[in-house]
Image (cartoon, grey):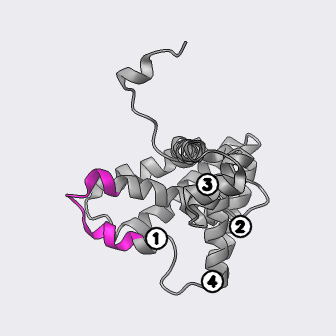
Amino acid sequence: MAEKQEIWEILSERMRKAQEGDSKEYELLLSKCREILLNYLSSKVRDKDDREDLIQDILVGIHKARITYRKEKPFAPWFFSIARYKTIDYIRRTSSRDKIVSAEMEHFPVEKETSPEDEWELQQGLESWLSVLEPRQRQILTMAKLEGRSVREISERTGLSESNVKVIVHRSIEKIKRIFSEPERTTPRSKTSKK
């Protein structure tokens, strides 16, 4: 356990240095992340090409979201929140080819027996996702998705209309997806300019 903690501390320090512009540390960080992902996913994603694609997707997600990493927070929850999100995307894309991952995703990245440390790491991962939102978006999304409150209840507590609550929840989720997920595919609709 101490060795595992030391690895995460090293990765956290490398991310801090990478955010300050140290490209060598960033390369070392991504290399170690790739190794961790390869070890973890080798038994879960049978197809070697799919596994490589998933690892690349996760690394791209880490690259895109690197500005959201907060230096004072541990690296592991932030890392696994991105890995989990990308793996869920993978499952959606390949559900007919690799069903074993779907069943195992219920435990990714949380181990079967959760300790207070595991719960804390999961909370930190959620905080990293929520950190990209404006305060009002964070409040509404937390009430809706983490506290399980109804749209009507949120509306009553915040003074916003129910339709406004729905819009805020939707836009918040889309913002998190945009930052932590694969690049959006270009569609004819996205090419049009808003006037």
Task: Classify mark 1: helix, strand or loop.
Answer: loop
The answer to whether residue 3 is left or right of residue 184 is right
Pointer 3 with pointer 1, Cβ within 8 A? no
State the quadrant of the N terminus: bottom right
The answer to whether residue 145 is left or right of residue 17 is left
Residue position marked by numbered label 2 in the rendering = 9
> So how many labels did they put on this image?
4
> Residue 133, image x and y in percent?
67, 46
Query: From the viewer's perspective, is residue 33 above or below residue 133?
Result: below
Is 40 included in the stretch rendered in magenta?
no
Mark 2 or mark 4, earlier in chain = 4
Q: In the image, what residue type sits under mark 1? A: Phe
Q: Nearer the viewer, residue 136 or 56?
A: 136
Mark 1 or mark 2, earlier in chain = 2
How far apart marks 2 and 3 lie (CA) works out to 30 Å
Residue position marked by numbered label 3 in the rendering = 141
Q: Residue at x 51, y 46 (%)?
A: 177
Which residues fall within the magenta stretch? 91-105
Q: In front: mark 3 or mark 1? A: 3
How far apart marks 2 and 4 lie (CA) works out to 12 Å
Q: Nearer the viewer, residue 13 or 119?
A: 119
> Residue 158, image x and y in percent?
71, 52
**Label 3 Cα neighbours within 10 Å, binned few <14 / some 14-19 / many ≥20:** many
> Residue 14, image x and y in percent?
70, 55
Q: In front: mark 4 or mark 3? A: 3
Residue position marked by numbered label 1 in the rendering = 108
Task: Classify mark 2: helix, strand or loop.
Answer: helix
Q: In the image, what residue type sits under mark 2? A: Glu
Label at residue 1? 4
Task: Classify mark 3: helix, strand or loop.
Answer: helix
Mark 4 or mark 3, earlier in chain = 4
**Label 1 Cα neighbours within 10 Å, binned few <14 / some 14-19 / many ≥20:** some
